[in-house]
């Protein structure tokens, strides 16, 4: 989720902060007893981003954008791209032209789809946010694990942030405050931009929701590597028993752990071009964003296509990027390779996928 706060919190499609260069884990995560889990999840998130970059390397190195990839992508990777990014017109080879940057104007098919922006965004996450800092500045992002710095104003209507010179960050009814105070709801984290205080800009923030912190403490919300290798029985149980009991919930959504969540949130930062949570449909005047497997696969079938630098396309949606990186990472995992099927279930592979 993406928010901004010059003096207030808004759900937005742009970002105020200057480019993010590194990350800082706030002391609140140490006090919560989950500092190491958060740092491990950040490293896992960067590894997922690297897997996505490696998966797309061949296409991004080709001079002829119209040409099919040579060597061709592994079938597991092609299916992942089909589900997450390919409109039916791309799958059938019957695309229509949209205005786009010159190098992205090509007749897209599933066999020649380059996904330039996806590769670029994942590269920016690794390059601009891959180092930890102990002294966060305006160019950095800070991860918070509690709300001790947030206080209500005397009238009880607004929220101020003690870490940011008691600037008003938003409404008491806003999602950031609710996220930090309640164990209810489906949000696991929110991100908002750096507020201005005269000439000073404060670091951007990723706020882990209260229920997220509790789940990390209990070992329920860790990272792919720790979960799949340290808890093989629990992994098997999730694979066998996860169903769509929750409306719109696919099995793979049970593996959107802290690393995938943090990767999603980092794509909202200015350092990764400030991606959106794109609306996939409207329900009774309420916009429903493309979250989780069902949401991102529905978005892939809507116009506009990818590659056009358009704000409502799948390659501008944070969860689409994060799930793609997750899929690339687990299919190439040498010890526990898994493929995400068309219906969002995990399928054990006989061997890890090798990217050309």
Image (cartoon, helix red, strand yellow):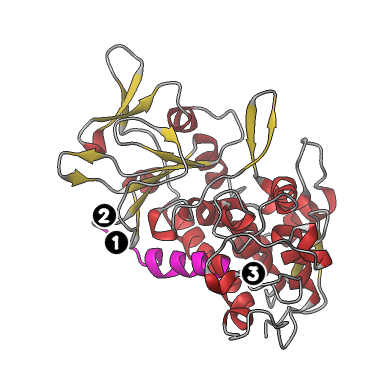
Q: Tags 2 and 1 in contact by the CB under 8 Å rule?
A: yes
* Residue at figure coordinates x 29%, y 61% from the top left: 133
Q: Provide the secondary structure element on which disc 2 rests.
A: loop
Give the distance between the C-alpha atoms of the residues marked 3 and 2, in whole angstroms.
29 Å
Q: Residues within 10 Å of mark 1 (few under 14, many from 20)?
A: some
From the top left corner, tell me how far across and down residue 264 is, in percent: 54, 53
Residue 136's tag is: 2
Specify whether residue 260 is in view: yes
Give the distance between the C-alpha atoms of the residues marked 2 and 1, in whole angstroms.
6 Å
Give the distance between the C-alpha atoms of the residues marked 1 and 3, in whole angstroms.
26 Å
* Count of residue discs: 3
Determine which quarter of the picture holds residue 322. Answer: bottom right
Residue 46 lies, with reference to residue 137, above or below; the image says below
Q: Tags 3 and 2 in contact by the CB under 8 Å rule?
A: no
Give the left or right position of residue 313, taking residue 25 as reference: right
Q: Provide the secondary structure element on which disc 3 rests.
A: helix
- Say which residue label 3 marks: 329
Q: From which residue to which does the magenta span run?
A: 118-134
Residue 9 lies, with reference to residue 228, above or below; the image says above
* Residue at figure coordinates x 47%, y 60% from the top left: 42
From the top left corner, tell me how far across and down residue 348 is, in percent: 81, 68
């Amino acid at each position: 989720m993406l928010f901004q706060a010059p003096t207030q919190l808004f759900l937005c499609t742009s970002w105020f902060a200057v480019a993010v260069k590194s990350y800082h884990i706030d002391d609140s995560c140490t006090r919560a007893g989950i500092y190491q889990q958060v740092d491990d999840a950040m490293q896992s998130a960067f590894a997922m981003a690297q897997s996505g970059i490696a998966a797309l390397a061949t296409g991004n190195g080709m001079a002829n954008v119209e040409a099919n990839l040579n060597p061709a992508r592994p079938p597991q990777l092609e299916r992942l791209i089909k589900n997450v990014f390919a409109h039916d017109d791309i799958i059938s080879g019957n695309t229509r032209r949209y205005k786009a940057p010159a190098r992205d104007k090509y007749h897209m098919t599933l066999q020649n789809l380059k996904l330039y922006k996806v590769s670029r965004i994942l590269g920016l996450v690794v390059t601009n946010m891959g180092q930890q800092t102990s002294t966060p500045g305006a160019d950095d992002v800070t991860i918070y694990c509690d709300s001790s710095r947030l206080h209500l104003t005397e009238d009880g209507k607004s929220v101020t942030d003690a870490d940011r010179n008691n600037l008003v960050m938003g409404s008491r009814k806003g999602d950031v405050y609710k996220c930090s105070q309640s164990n209810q709801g489906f949000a696991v984290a929110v991100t908002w931009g750096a507020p201005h205080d005269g000439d000073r800009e404060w670091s951007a923030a990723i706020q882990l929701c209260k229920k997220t912190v509790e789940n990390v403490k209990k070992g329920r919300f860790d990272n792919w590597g720790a979960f799949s290798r340290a808890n093989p029985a629990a992994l098997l149980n999730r694979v066998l028993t996860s169903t769509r009991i929750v409306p719109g919930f696919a099995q793979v959504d049970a593996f959107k752990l802290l690393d995938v969540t943090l990767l999603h949130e980092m794509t909202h930062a200015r350092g990764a071009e400030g991606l959106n949570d794109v609306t996939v449909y409207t329900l009774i005047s309420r916009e429903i964003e493309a979250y989780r497997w069902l949401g991102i696969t529905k978005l892939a079938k809507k116009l506009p296509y990818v590659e056009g630098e358009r704000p409502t396309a799948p390659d501008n949606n944070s969860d689409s990027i994060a799930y793609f990186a997750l899929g690339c990472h687990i299919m190439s995992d040498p010890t526990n390779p898994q493929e995400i099927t068309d219906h969002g279930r995990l399928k054990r592979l006989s061997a890890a996928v090798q990217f050309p």
